[in-house]
Image (cartoon, helix red, strand yellow):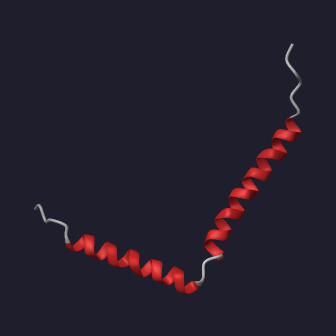
Amino acid sequence: MTKPVNLRQYRKQKARKDRAETAQANRVTHGTPKALRDAAEADAARIRAELDGKKRDDS
């Protein structure tokens, strides 16, 4: 016979895990200074523009 499973414990574990994931995402979003976010966004835009300029036109 198997051991009885306490579903309440599993629900609590899942809730803790979900809250930890949400907290981690919030730390990334809200923990970065605006200057760093803007710099990263500018770098991404520069890289996108550079790649778009290197595309071939196969029409």
**Residue at (86%, 28%) from the top-left corner?**
5
Asked whether, in this view, residue 43 is left or right of residue 19, the answer is left
Q: How many marks?
A: 0
Above or below, 5 relative to 40: above
Asked whether, in this view, residue 55 is left or right of residue 4, the answer is left
Above or below, 30 relative to 57: below
Above or below, 44 relative to 15: below
Task: Give x and y (percent) for residue 46.
Answer: 34, 79
**Residue at (77%, 46%) from the top-left corner?**
14
**Residue at (74%, 51%) from the top-left corner?**
17
Figure quadrant of the N terminus: top right
Nearest to the observer: residue 58 or residue 54: 54
Figure quadrant of the C terminus: bottom left
Asked whether, in this view, residue 32 is left or right of residue 17, the answer is left
The single residue placed furthest to the bottom in the displayed view is 35
**Residue at (85%, 35%) from the top-left corner?**
7
The single residue placed furthest to the left in the displayed view is 59
Nearest to the observer: residue 57 or residue 40: 40
Task: Give x and y (percent) for residue 56.
Answer: 15, 65
* Residue 41: quarter of image: bottom left
Asked whether, in this view, residue 33 is left or right of residue 12, the answer is left
Task: Give x and y (percent) for residue 32.
Answer: 60, 78
* Residue 58: quarter of image: bottom left
